[in-house]
Amino acid sequence: MVPASKRCAEAGAGLGLPVESERGTLRGMQGLNSEELARLSPEERLALIGQLWDSLRDTEVPLPEAQQGELSRRLSSLGQDRTQALTWEQLRAELARRRP
């Protein structure tokens, strides 16, 4: 799959869209106003969104409270869940026994 940042550069060629810097972040955003953004095709806007998203580090994306709670719940039950896990061979054998 082509990274969103590359798709944005390709889709926006010649349109004055921001390009990637050496660090992979956008430069030239101050040159885009709402009218210019509105003239972009849906594909170009999606590519730009993808480039913006790709420029964020995991630590820069806040996790909503509900997702943080679910993540905590899953991590706390991980040990117990592993004791109940089946190997692929066990699961395949169980499914074979259930098949008519």
Image: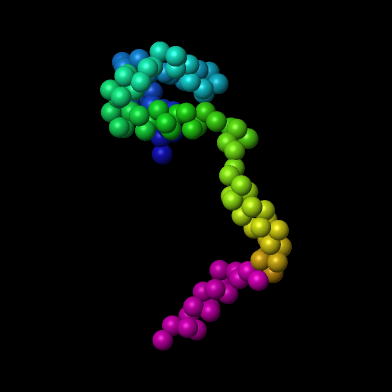
Q: Position of residue 91 (x, y in %)?
A: 54, 73
In the rendered image, the vertical position of residue 29 relative to residue 48, given as above or below:
above
Q: Quadrant of the N terminus?
A: top left
In the rendered image, the vertical position of residue 48 relative to residue 81, given as above or below:
above
Residue lying farthest to the bottom in this orientation: 100
In the rendered image, the vertical position of residue 75 relative to residue 15, given as above or below:
below
Residue at x-position 45% and y-position 29%: 51
Q: Position of residue 98 (x, y in %)?
A: 47, 83
Q: In the rendered structure, does residue 91 fall within the stretch colored magenta?
A: yes
Locate residue 92 relative to residue 45 in the image: left or right: right
Residue at x-position 40% and y-position 28%: 48
Q: In the rendered structure, does residue 61 fall within the stretch colored magenta?
A: no
Q: How many marks?
A: 0
Q: Quadrant of the C terminus?
A: bottom left
Q: Position of residue 19 (x, y in %)?
A: 43, 18
Q: Position of residue 36 (x, y in %)?
A: 32, 19
Q: Main secondary structure of the magenta part?
A: helix
Residue 96 seen in the figure: yes
Q: Quadrant of residue 62?
A: top right
Locate residue 80 relative to residue 70 in the image: left or right: right
Residue 71 seen in the figure: no
Locate residue 63 relative to residue 8 in the image: left or right: right
Which residues are the magenta region?
84-100
18 or 20: nearer the viewer = 18
Locate residue 44 relative to residue 6 in the image: left or right: left
Residue at x-position 59% and y-position 42%: 63
Q: How is the image coloured?
A: rainbow
